[in-house]
Image (cartoon, rainbow, N blue to C red):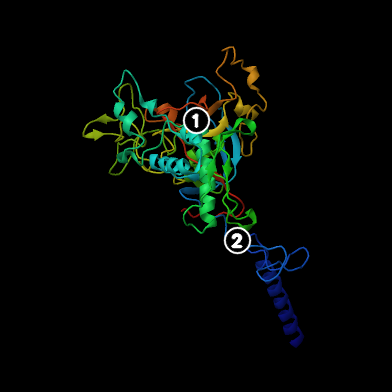
């Protein structure tokens, strides 16, 4: 009996030790004080050697929401009334990433202009100015928007417009430098020396500004450096807009597909105090931008403030309507059949070269300067509010109906918190 008791104790002790080892396994957050492959100690403040810095996850990025990646059906769900057949349905997987919860506003862009005016060349500052004449229309009295939309305090939280794809990309580059310099100082005032010279010719046709830092930024190994802000890929944007996480009900099953960033085929709220009110800001029909006075159904004749309407299931505002938004991708009508099914993107002149379209002889509008924009705007009919629809325009062009928001990759173990 005594032997049986001792045997049981040994088994229990072995199980405890085995379980304890499992519980103490190394992770990216807790790599241990010694190197697992060699048993040698990591360096610290007192001793030399490779230092495994403490890491609590990717730092929270201002204004950004964590978007958990996964599989989804990318492409046009609604009837293809334009007969372009350029975004047929296919299954793809998108890795987790971060995205601005709202469109970049006028005050965000004015803050950027203020900072680059003191830190950059006059040529770059002038190249960054939005085109306020996008509001000008000789057959429409929009003079007040030409003069006031960008700078008048009453429009501070309205989405910036008149910004080209190139200008939006330059803003993302500046933001990366500014935020990381701030994080290097523990969130204080930004460091001097975030300067931008003439726009360089970037690889693959990406026209970007050249940031020059004073060298004070922390290393990547520190874990305190954020990845670069950038425009979202078309797949990321569409995935985030559909927010299919809201239709999840059991295992990997989803209750329904989505035509818009919300459930159902209606553009109106179906219950509550706002029953019958529009879910987004768009053009309801010919000559009808908002409804009648006293009952403006979507409350806005032109754009709306960036936090208007209810967010989708990822917590993102205005992923349908208000303003269209630039995405990273080059436009090609056959992207849906050339795609990689993991993190798809269309880069410049890889397969389907622009020479095949003969834009120089005006036989096509398609070349390596055409960028995709999505989401529908205050001046668009409901068809364009569906995330699967897509249009394109020259990367140097700007309109009163196109704005942007930024995205950022999620690197390793994520922090789901938002700043």
Q: Residues within 10 Å of mark 1 (few under 14, many from 20)?
A: many
288 with respect to 330 (left or right): left
Give 83 or 220, whichever is nearer the viewer. Answer: 220
**Which one is earlier in the sequence, the residue at label 2 or at label 1?**
2
What residue is at 49 percent from the left and 55 percent from the top? 417
Where residue 371 appears, as percent x and y from the top left, is: 54, 28
Q: Residues within 10 Å of mark 2 (few under 14, many from 20)?
A: some
What residue is at 35 percent from the left and 40 percent from the top? 305
Give 159 or 310, whichever is nearer the viewer. Answer: 159
Location of residue 46 (image quadrant): bottom right
Where residue 225 appears, as percent x and y from the top left, is: 58, 53
What residue is at 21 percent from the left and 34 percent from the top? 294
Location of residue 137 (image quadrant): top left
Q: Which residue is mark 1?
A: 373
Element under disc 1: strand
Location of residue 104 (image quadrant): top left
Q: Which residue is mark 2?
A: 55
**Count of labels shown?**
2
In the image, farthest residue toward the left: 294
350 with respect to 120 (left or right): right
Where residue 254 appears, as percent x and y from the top left, is: 52, 42
Label 2 vs label 1: CA separation?
37 Å
- Does 49 appear above or below 3? above
Give 354 or 12, whichever is nearer the viewer. Answer: 354
């Amino acid at each position: 009996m005594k032997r049986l008791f001792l045997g049981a104790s040994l088994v229990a002790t072995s199980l405890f030790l085995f379980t304890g080892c499992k519980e103490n396994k190394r992770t990216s957050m807790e790599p241990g004080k010694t190197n697992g492959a060699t048993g040698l100690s990591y360096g610290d403040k007192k001793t030399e050697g490779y230092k495994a810095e403490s890491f609590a996850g990717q730092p929270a990025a201002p204004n950004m929401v964590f978007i958990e990646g996964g599989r989804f059906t990318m492409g046009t769900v609604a009837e293809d009334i334009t007969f372009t057949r350029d975004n047929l349905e296919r299954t793809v997987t998108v890795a987790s990433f971060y995205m601005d919860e709202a469109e970049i506003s006028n005050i965000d862009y004015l803050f950027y202009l203020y900072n680059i005016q003191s830190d950059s060349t006059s040529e770059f500052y002038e190249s960054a100015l939005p085109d306020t004449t996008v509001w000008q229309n000789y057959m429409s009295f929009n003079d007040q928007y030409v003069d006031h939309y960008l700078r008048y305090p009453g429009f501070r939280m309205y989405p910036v417009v008149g910004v080209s794809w190139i200008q939006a990309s330059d803003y993302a580059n500046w933001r990366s430098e500014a935020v990381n310099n701030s994080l290097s100082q523990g969130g204080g005032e930004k460091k001097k020396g975030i300067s931008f010279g003439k726009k360089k010719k970037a690889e693959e046709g990406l026209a970007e500004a050249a940031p020059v830092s004073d060298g004070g930024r922390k290393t990547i190994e520190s874990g305190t450096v954020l990845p670069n802000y950038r425009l979202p890929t078309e797949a990321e944007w569409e995935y985030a807009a559909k927010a299919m996480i809201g239709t999840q009900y059991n295992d990997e099953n989803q209750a329904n597909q989505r035509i818009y960033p919300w459930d159902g085929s209606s553009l109106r709220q179906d219950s509550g105090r706002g029953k019958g009110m529009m879910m987004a800001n768009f053009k309801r029909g010919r000559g009808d931008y908002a409804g009648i006075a006293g009952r403006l159904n979507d409350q806005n004749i032109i754009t709306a403030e960036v936090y208007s309407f209810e967010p989708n299931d990822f917590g993102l505002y205005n992923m349908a309507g208000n303003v269209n938004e630039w995405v990273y991708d080059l436009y090609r009508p056959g992207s849906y059949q050339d795609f990689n099914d993991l993190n798809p993107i269309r880069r410049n002149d890889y397969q389907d070269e622009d020479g095949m379209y003969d834009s120089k002889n005006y036989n096509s509008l398609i070349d390596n300067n055409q960028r995709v924009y999505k989401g529908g705007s205050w001046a668009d009919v409901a068809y364009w509010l569906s995330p699967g629809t897509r249009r394109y325009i020259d990367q140097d062009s700007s309109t009163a109906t196109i704005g942007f928001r930024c995205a950022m990759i999620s690197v390793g173990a994520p922090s789901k918190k938002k700043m």
